Image (cartoon, rainbow, N blue to C red):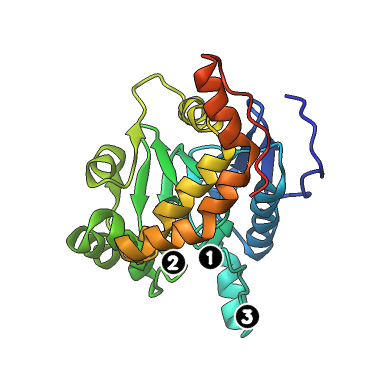
């Protein structure tokens, strides 16, 4: 779908970019023969892509999915082995594995999990804002089986989502958790029914977000992130009000939303300037 941007998207050899509907960016991890394992260059390419999402006024939300039978099987272990043997560093952007496992960002990202999400791939979905999974999707942190540890941000975040005992089970056993079980644990928002396409369902969810005030989405997400990052309820509320409320009140979208309600019409949002 043709769309005009203030700045063109960054080049990428690792992921395919598309725009299923105005305001929505779809990022498809595209190394299917390697189960979409992410190498060092891939992390930095993805960091540039999601930074562009945050900065581009025409976009309101992102979706990340995988090509083929995997969402993402984690790190490129062949590259890791070469780097380890040669004593090379493995630099990763501050946003973490796949530019998502430690991302704070401004705009939401939905994971459309089409298959296995193992290791770093699982760390990505743990820090995504919402997760839609195919019925055959599966999740695992198998690092302990390879003598390594999931240090890209998942462990302290996982306990907030699924609790200590379940987080311990995933991290210490490395076992695979199927989609329905992950949904029951609160790791997944919804599991697609048989015959449903996971990307299509994620796009429908993204449309619900994109239809809302882009200012309100940004500020609401910031409020939830404060709790996610360990701030107490009262401190989080104070920070949200002190940091964001005045900016929200001065924006065009709050005025448009209230006016549209009074006039009984659909709001005409403008790109967020927050």
The extreme bottom residue here reads 87
The extreme top residue here reads 264
Residue at the image position 51 percent from the left and 51 percent from the top? 245
Q: Earlier in the sequence, mark 2 or mark 1?
A: 1
Q: Mark 1 points at which residue?
A: 77
Of 106 and 159, nearer the camera is: 106
Of 265 and 132, nearer the camera is: 265
The label shown at residue 5 is none
Residue at the image position 57 percent from the left and 66 percent from the top? 78
Which quarter of the picture shows residue 66? top right
- Do labels 1 and 3 touch, CB within 8 Å? no
In this picture, residue 21 sits left or right of residue 176 = right
Q: Height in image: 63 above or below 126?
A: above
Q: Whole-Å distance between the Cαs marked 3 and 2?
A: 18 Å
Q: Whole-Å distance between the Cαs marked 1 and 3?
A: 14 Å
Q: Height in image: 120 above or below 138?
A: below
Residue at the image position 51 percent from the left and 41 percent from the top? 217
Task: Return the x and y of residue 162 as percentages of the image width and height.
Answer: 25, 54
Of 93 and 250, nearer the camera is: 250
In this picture, residue 99 sits left or right of residue 235 = right
User: Crowding at label 1, few (<14), some or many (≥20) Cα neighbours within 10 Å?
Assistant: few
Q: Nearer the viewer, mark 2 or mark 1?
A: 2
In this picture, residue 62 sits left or right of residue 242 = right
Looking at the rendered structure, the secondary structure element under dot 2 is loop
Q: Name the residue under label 3.
A: 89
Task: Return the x and y of residue 136 as percentages of the image width and height.
Answer: 36, 35
Q: Mark 2 points at which residue?
A: 153
Q: Which of marks 3 and 2 is nearer the N terminus?
A: 3
Q: Can residue 30 be seen in this view?
A: no
Looking at the rendered structure, the secondary structure element under dot 1 is helix
Looking at the rendered structure, the secondary structure element under dot 3 is loop
Q: Nearer the viewer, mark 3 or mark 2?
A: 2
């Amino acid at each position: 779908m043709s769309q005009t941007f203030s700045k063109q998207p960054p080049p990428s050899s690792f992921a395919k970019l598309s725009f299923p509907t105005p305001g929505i960016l779809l990022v498809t991890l595209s190394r299917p023969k390697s189960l979409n394992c992410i190498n060092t260059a891939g992390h930095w390419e993805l960091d540039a892509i999601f930074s562009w999402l945050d900065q581009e006024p025409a976009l309101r939300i992102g979706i990340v999915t995988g090509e083929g039978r995997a969402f993402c099987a984690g790190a490129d272990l062949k590259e890791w082995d070469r780097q380890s043997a040669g004593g090379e560093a493995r630099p990763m952007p501050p946003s973490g594995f796949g530019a998502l496992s430690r991302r704070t960002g401004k705009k939401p990202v939905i994971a459309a999990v089409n298959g296995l999400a193992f290791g770093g791939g699982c760390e990505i979905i743990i820090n995504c804002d919402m997760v839609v999974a195919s019925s055959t999707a599966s999740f695992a942190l198998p690092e302990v089986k390879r003598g390594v540890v999931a240090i890209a941000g998942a462990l302290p975040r996982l306990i907030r989502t699924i609790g200590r005992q379940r987080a311990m089970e995933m991290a210490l056993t490395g076992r695979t958790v199927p989609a329905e079980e992950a949904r029951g644990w609160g790791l997944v928002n919804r599991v697609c029914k048989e015959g449903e396409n996971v990307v299509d369902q994620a796009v429908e969810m993204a449309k619900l977000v994109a239809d809302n005030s882009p200012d309100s989405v940004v500020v609401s997400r910031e409020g939830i992130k404060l709790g996610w990052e360990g701030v107490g309820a009262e401190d989080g509320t104070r920070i949200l009000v002190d940091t964001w409320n005045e900016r929200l009140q001065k924006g065009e979208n709050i005025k448009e939303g209230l006016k549209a309600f009074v006039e009984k019409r659909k709001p005409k949002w403008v790109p967020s300037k927050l």
